[in-house]
Amino acid sequence: MIRKYPHLLWGLQNPRKREKDGMSTETFHHKLDFTGLSLEKAGTPEWERVRAQMMEVVANEENWFEAVYDGVAQELREALFGRTVKELFALPVEVKMRNTSNKAYHGYVGQIPGLDYEALSVFDAHLVEGTRSFTELMWPEGNPSFCDIVHSFGRQLSELEKMVRRMLLESLGVVKHFDRQNSELTFGLRMAKYGALTSQEATVVLPPHVDETTVTLVVQHKVAGLQVLTADGEWLAVPPSPNSYTVLIGQSLQGWSNGRLRAKLHRVMVGGEDTRYSSIFASHPKDDVVVQVPEELVDEEHPLIYKPFGYPGFVNFHHSEEGMKSDDALKAYCGVQLDEVGA
């Protein structure tokens, strides 16, 4: 069975009006140091310092940064990419295709004509039950090592995601919603493989797009590829780092924050003879949750932009023909119309 994924061949959204050709070699500069931080240190001077740096980035409409974080052991990252991920992608295609989802592109993606790309997703990656369920799906006979490594990685990265999101909510003045938001979110770990190209020329293999997630943490292993579109319209290559994680705001948080926080456009460009492995750890609303703007984020200066929406419906719309034609899938799906606000 061959699955066709036109989004990966020509773009998840229509990027033509925004994209500039070529790769930037500009030095990366949005790097924030979370070393030694934890949720228990909220309100301390070191916490406030990192939060101020983060909001300076967000205020400049970048909405992304690199988080240096020591909460994940180097040995764990090496175990994940050096053995575990490779073991997963070595499985037969018919086994990997067991990874299904009710949401578009949240299960197995692969077997795309002309594109050597595969990805699989572990749902509830921060929970033992979630990683065990995925492991038993791939290896009915069991694979304790795989399960332990993936669970440890997901659990430790969930702490970084929570710190980032709490700082964002604090800066918006709505931190009182943090605990409730935690209960409404889950975490997924998406592992991706980009095959080596026969041509040395760099090629865009994952076209410009924004994530539907709440917050995304991208982990690149040795081989570069991730690029983000800066506020001045240039593509910036983000180099791999053994101790940092690229943080991107997603559309679910954009909707929840009434547009105060904006999803970040990014793409993947690869070239050369090395296979690229990456993992995408992301928070997103649970299937039965209605994403709704807190009343504190709606006022005369910030009228309501987005109506309440459910994550599965939005994701599937995003990847539908109508969603792909839209420059802003979130606005097309749940944006408030002028006649709805009396304009």
Image: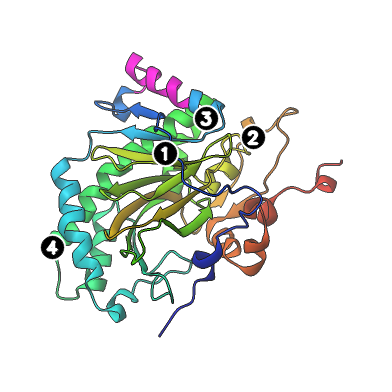
- Asked if residue 301 lies left or right of residue 68, the reply is right
**How busy is the neighbourhood of tag 1: few (under 14 within 10 Å), some, or many (20 plus)?**
few
**How busy is the neighbourhood of tag 4: few (under 14 within 10 Å), some, or many (20 plus)?**
few
Looking at marks 1 and 4 on the same chain, the residue that comes earlier in the sequence is marked by 1
Q: Based on the displayed image, in which of its 4 quarters is residue 316 positioned?
A: bottom right
Quadrant holding the C terminus: top right
Q: Front-most of 297 and 54? A: 54
Pair 1/4: label in front: 1
Q: Is residue 343 a member of the stretch shown in magenta?
A: no
SS at circle 2: helix
Q: Front-most of 327 and 281? A: 327
Q: List the residue tagged with mark 4.
A: 144
Amino acid type of the residue that numbered disc 2 sits on in the rendered structure:
Glu
Residue 58 got which mark? 3
Residue 290 got which mark? none
Q: List the residue tagged with mark 1.
A: 25
Q: CA distance from mark 3 to mark 2?
A: 22 Å
Residue sitting at 57 percent across and 64 percent down? 319
Q: List the residue tagged with mark 2.
A: 295
Pair 1/3: label in front: 1
Residue sitting at 54 percent across and 48 percent down? 252
Amino acid type of the residue that numbered disc 4 sits on in the rendered structure:
Pro
Looking at marks 4 and 2 on the same chain, the residue that comes earlier in the sequence is marked by 4
